[in-house]
Image (cartoon, rainbow, N blue to C red):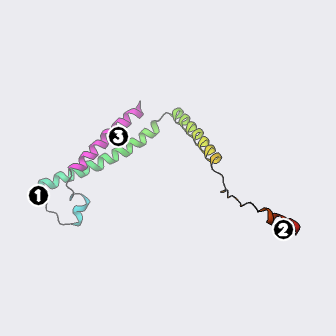
């Protein structure tokens, strides 16, 4: 239950981050520190709020991801890992059976005259 709530909150926070980034002025944030800032006071405060909001949502996403990882059902994770392991082993066996380890080259057959000469020597 906690896992599902965390995933839902991560989705909401991700959408909010996307919207906050799209609303921001491209010359605000870290780029404003390197160039001349031509913003009025109100716009500057709005960009500061959006930047803080973006960083806050990014931290919320990281924390919720860690909580969701800890809240996962251990039995389902173990079962999933064993199924993945079985699939990987089956795939490895199929690949090893279909492709020879060393490329096979056809040797030209010796002509009968050469075979007789070699046998006489």
Q: Residue furthest right?
A: 120
Q: Residue furthest bottom?
A: 121
In the rendered image of this protein, does residue 23 appear above or below residue 113? Answer: above
Q: Are marks 1 and 2 in contact (CB under 8 Å)?
A: no
Q: From mark 1 to mark 3, how far is it between C-alphas?
A: 34 Å
User: Closer to the N terminus: mark 1 or mark 2?
Assistant: 1
Q: Which residue is mark 1?
A: 40
Left or right: 61 in relation to 99: left
Left or right: 110 in relation to 83: right
Magenta stretch: give its range: 1-23
Which SS class for mark 3?
A: helix
Indicate yes or no whether the magenta region holds residue 26.
no
Q: From mark 3 to mark 2, how far is it between C-alphas?
A: 81 Å
Q: Foreground mark, 3 or 2? A: 2
Q: Which residue is mark 2?
A: 117
Q: Foreground mark, 1 or 2? A: 2
Q: Where is residue 105 drawn, in percent x and y?
A: 67, 58
Left or right: 120 in relation to 56: right
Q: Look at 40% across and 42% down and name the residue there.
A: 65
Q: Where is residue 111 drawn, in percent x and y?
A: 76, 62
Of 108 and 44, which appears nearest the observer?
108
Q: Foreground mark, 1 or 3? A: 3
User: If the image is split into quadrants, where does the C terminus sit?
Assistant: bottom right
Q: Which residue is mark 3?
A: 10
Which SS class for mark 2?
A: helix
């Amino acid at each position: 239950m906690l896992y599902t709530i965390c995933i839902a909150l991560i989705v909401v926070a991700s959408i909010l981050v996307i919207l906050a980034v799209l609303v921001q002025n491209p010359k605000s944030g870290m780029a404003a520190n390197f160039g001349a800032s031509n913003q009025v006071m109100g716009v500057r405060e709005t960009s500061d709020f959006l930047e803080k909001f973006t960083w806050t949502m990014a931290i919320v996403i990281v924390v919720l991801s860690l909580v969701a990882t800890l809240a996962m059902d251990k039995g389902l994770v173990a079962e999933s890992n064993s199924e993945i392991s079985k699939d990987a082993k089956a795939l490895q066996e199929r690949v090893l059976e279909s492709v020879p380890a060393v490329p096979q080259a056809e040797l030209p057959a010796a002509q009968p005259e050469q075979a007789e000469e070699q046998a006489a020597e």
